Amino acid sequence: MARSLTLLGATGSIGASTLDLVRRNPDDWRVEALTANCSAGELAALAREFGAKIAVVGDEACLPELRDALAGSGIEAAGGVEALCEAASRAVDMTVAAIVGTAGLAPTMKAVERGGTIALANKEALVSAGDVMTAAVAQHGATLLPTDSEHNAIFQCLAGNEIEDVARITLTASGGPLRTWPIERIATATPAEAIAHPNWSMGAKISVDSATMMNKGLEFIEAHHLFPVGLQRLRIVVHPQSVIHSMVEYRDRSTLAQLGPSDMRVPIASCLAYPARMETPLEPLDLASIGQLTFEAPDETRFPATRLAREAIQQGGGAPATLNAANEVAVAAFLDGRVAFGQITQIVEETLATLSAPSPGSMNDVLALDADARAMAENLVENRFV
Ligand code: NAD
Ligand code: MG
């Protein structure tokens, strides 16, 4: 029987990978809701192709265009944050949370509060909301299936084992496109250079995060919430080939690793089919042609972001939400050409040092912290870093 699916962030990179798998298995899925920020024409075309019941744009200004594009289709059109939340509250078998940034928090929390099964790609939501989200997951009996490739790898390596037996979880990092660059050159990397990821094709924001290594910092915090083994048991290792997606070492010194092509359709398929397996259109892994798997320690002098993230989660309270919000602002400013690459982590560090963020007790507290940190980071962009 077909299972129902809502895809938050349908027009993005994760959205496209998800829909590619759905398109190949049309009898397995019935699409309820598809959402985007704007991209009304593209969203409408997807909604028509997949026979969605509703299409939602987060930006209400794009609703008239969406309505026009859906005219005569019988597909409902809606716009605004409330509409995203309404769509995310609808009963479905699977929600794929693939909005980028804390813009995805409120709709993802609606799916959590419904007690749904959520394939979580939207790491920023979990990084900012942290315990607020994991407590809601427990309270409402929701299921989070980690979709981020590293966390999906860890999830697979934990299957059939006890979390108490874990000695160490190692997140692998490609090191990004600037991995071998000297520090002076990193400081002035352009958006085109920062986005040119060697192994993965992704949205602009996460591509910049991979170049600064903030992506791995966010993933360190994400791993802490998904797999509560304690911060001292979480490690990062740079593995430029991105073949091993992460590893779990047990107390007997057995290490389990998950390997696969660097294509998000693999972890997405693992979530969509969970606990079963499904086909993906990818070539089998050819280790002989890959030849070598190499590893190196992260260099936090050239790439301070993992240190900032580790300090933020050690500090706890509202620090991770502050880190994330400042990073979102700084990355957007970098992509707009308003700050230099090297200033991204400086803005994050300075926002963290300036703002004393109390521990959030609810999603509204998280959103308030997020707004404060954004205002502070914007202020730094405007007044200090131009
Ligand atoms: P993307 O930029 O390609 O797509 C983002 C999607 O979110 C789009 O559909 C966009 O319309 C929507 N969106 C953006 N702002 C919005 C807003 N304010 N309101 C409503 N919708 C909004 O991003 P992506 O690369 O697909 O990443 C999505 C999420 O998945 C991110 O959290 C990212 O960190 C995570 N992730 C991505 C990858 C990857 O390979 N792309 C891998 C692991 C995790
Ligand atoms: Mg990842």
Image: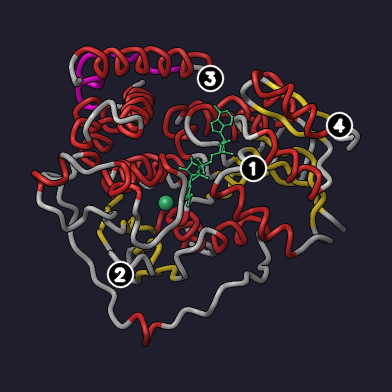
Q: x, y (%) of residue 308?
A: 23, 34
Segment tinted magenta in the rendering? 348-360
Counting residues from the N terminus, which is met first, the one under dot 4 or under dot 2?
4
How many labels sit on residues? 4
Q: Nearer the viewer, mark 1 or mark 3?
A: 1
Q: Can you tell which quarter of the image residue 311 is in?
A: top left
The residue indicated by pointer 4 is: 71
Do the residues bearing badges 1 and 3 touch, measured as CB atoms within 8 Å? no
Q: Is residue 209 above or below residue 347?
A: below
Report the amino acid beneath label 2: Arg
Question: Gap in Å between the C-alphas at discs 4 and 3?
Answer: 36 Å
The residue indicated by pointer 1 is: 10
Question: Gap in Å between the C-alphas at discs 3 and 2?
Answer: 39 Å
Q: Is residue 368 above or below residue 136?
A: above
Do the residues bearing badges 4 and 3 touch, measured as CB atoms within 8 Å? no
The residue indicated by pointer 3 is: 363
The secondary element bearing badge 1 is classed as: loop
Question: Gap in Å between the C-alphas at discs 4 and 2?
Answer: 60 Å
Report the amino acid beneath label 4: Ala
Q: Can you tell which quarter of the image residue 109 is in?
A: top right
